[in-house]
Amino acid sequence: MSGENEKILAKQRLTEFLETKKMRKTPERFKILDVIYSQSGFFDAESLKKNLDLDYPVSLATIYNALELFLQCNLIIRHTFGLRVKYEKTPVGSSHYYQICMQCGNYKSFTDLKLKKSISLRTFSAFNITNHSLYFYGICKKCGQKNKKQNR
Amino acid sequence: MSGENEKILAKQRLTEFLETKKMRKTPERFKILDVIYSQSGFFDAESLKKNLDLDYPVSLATIYNALELFLQCNLIIRHTFGLRVKYEKTPVGSSHYYQICMQCGNYKSFTDLKLKKSISLRTFSAFNITNHSLYFYGICKKCGQKNKKQNR
DNA sequence: TTTGTTGCAAAACGTTTGCAGCCTC
DNA sequence: GAGGCTGCAAACGTTTTGCAACAAA
């Protein structure tokens, strides 16, 4: 199963990272990572806490600590849709792109290999790229129709 | 002068938007827009307040109200670098792209016409794109060197 | 005159911090 | 055993809210 494999790789990466940084392999950190890699889609500190409370309660401070850590070893990425911060497992292989309605705030992600290829061509001097995020902002069909009605 | 022209267009767009939405053309809204279009680079509510206090004090609540309004009519865009929210005049013509160091949080913007062209090719059904933002995440030279030293 | 908008202050919200105690190494 | 990590609660900074007064239409 691909999901399980992904989870194992994530744990390996965390282990390696902690060892090279001489940080501790606490059960909390691995439990939080496990929950993240057991779900799909976006999440935040609060939803993570709710999930963890079911079988392994962890304080919010520790969750924020872990999220910061996972960001550093590139296990997760951080987005901001509207004002809310959302995290996501780092997309492997094909990058995810996002379309966000500026009116209702709804968002969804999609993949586009062609786009990914174009973007990956871009090189930087004195900057080591690990990943990129692309957001398309606009008005969704639903809101567009609502506006038309309103302006009549 | 291009900056002045840009400002006039912005005011026109705001006027139109307010009229179609049957909202009021208050001096505060136009003053805030004026300050935004008199500066360059990134800004937030607080820096805006500081600038406004010099000759036309406006309450923070009103500033947030105005920022929300300007977002809706696409006069400004919102970014989140690290955890800080930053606004920017909507880039006209050439889109801006951003590189952000995941370690120190420093960011800078650049333009890339080739990239812009590739991205603009992407079309959507049932979604009316007004603009897009692309962020490159990585480790800047300075932090990269710092890490090397640390791991020795 | 009507009612959308403002200013003010208080409240809410997500996140960070300080510190004592715990547990990994 | 040392000190990095955790949990708790208090503190923080930013954004939102409720409400009375104001002013655009």
Image (cartoon, coloured by chain):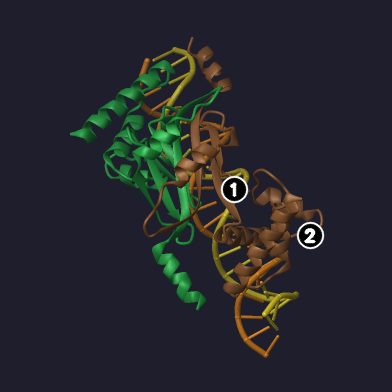
Chain colours: A green, B brown, C orange, D yellow
At horizontal 51% and vertical 42% (from top left) the residue drawn is B116
Looking at the image, the residue that sits furthest to the right is B55
Other residues around mark 2 within 10 Å, as few (<14) / some (14–19) / many (≥20): few
Q: Quarter of the image containing the N terminus of chain A?
A: top left
Marks 1 and 2 sit apart, C-alpha to C-alpha, by 31 Å
Residue marked by disc 1: B93
Is residue B50 visible from the viewing direction of this image?
Answer: no
Residue marked by disc 2: B56
Task: State the SS at label 2.
Answer: loop
Which chain does the numbered disc 1 sit on?
Answer: B
Which chain does the numbered disc 2 sit on?
Answer: B
C18 and B4: which is toward the camera? B4
Task: State the SS at label 1.
Answer: loop
Q: Amino acid at mark 2?
A: Tyr
At horizontal 78% and vertical 55% (from top left) the residue drawn is B53
Looking at the image, the residue that sits furthest to the top is B152
Left or right placement of residue A124 versus residue B23 in this view: left
Residue D21's image quarter?
Answer: bottom right
Disc 1 to disc 2: CB gap under 8 Å: no
Q: Please name which of the two marks, 1 or 2, marks the residue nearer to the observer.
A: 1
Q: Position of residue A43 (x, y in %)?
A: 37, 45
Q: Position of residue D3 (x, y in %)?
A: 49, 18
Left or right placement of residue B45 versus residue B115 in this view: right
Q: Is A16 above or below relative to B53?
A: above
